[in-house]
Image (cartoon, rainbow, N blue to C red):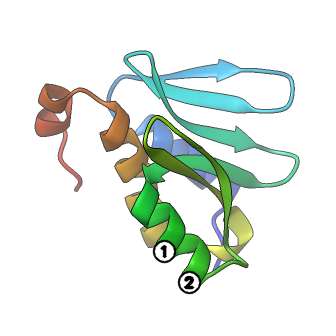
Amino acid sequence: MGVPSGQFLRMVDSLAEVESDEVRDYTAFSVRGKRFGYYWPRTRTVGLKQTLSEQIALVAERPDVFEVQFTAGGFGWVVVHLPKIDADELTELVYEAWRLSAPEPLVEQHPIR
């Protein structure tokens, strides 16, 4: 179990029209100007946009893997500990984060595989 950082970055890169912004301690990911994720290499954690209900469920079910990052604009962001999650689940969460930020026509052109 556990997802290497490089594998996470490949997941993000496989999504359509992703832009990344490198800041001193982290990388931020957006689609058409809307933020959907963050990556902190030092802590091997990522922050992903989710629905509020999904944020609450993930943190309640597995607080060793997920923690509340913040809430904003009706969305709940979660911190995901890469060493404690499997690739299939992370792939779904990354896609969902992207889908929540991407315009509907772009989502329709790029359904989850």
Image location (x, y in percent) of residue 16: 32, 30
Q: Residue at x 60, y 72 (%)?
A: 59
The answer to whether 72 appears left or right of 91 in the picture is: right
Compared with residue 111, is residue 13 higher up or lower down, i.e. above or below? above
- Rounded to the nearest whole Å, what is the CA distance between mark 1 and mark 2? 6 Å
Residue 89 placement, left or right of 77: left
Q: Position of residue 113 (x, y in %)?
A: 22, 56
Query: Which class describes the residues within 10 Å of circle 2: few (<14), some (14-19), or many (20+)?
Result: few
- What element does badge 1 sit on? helix
Q: Residue furthest top?
A: 33
Q: Nearer the viewer, residue 91 or 72?
A: 72
Please name the amino acid that badge 1 sits on. Answer: Ala
Q: Which mark is residue 57?
A: 1
Picture layout, residue 9 above or below residue 92: above
For mark 2, what is the residue? Answer: 61
Q: Which residue is at 77% across, 43% downward?
A: 40
Is label 1 in contact with label 2 (beta carbons under 8 Å)? Answer: yes
Amino acid, disc 2: Glu
Question: Relative to 101, is 17 above or below?
Answer: above
- Would you place residue 82 above or below residue 20 in this image? below
Do we see residue 87 in this rendering?
no
Check disc 1: other Cα within 10 Å, few if <14, some if 14-19, many if 20+.
Answer: few
Horizontal side of 56 relative to 95 (left or right) equals: right
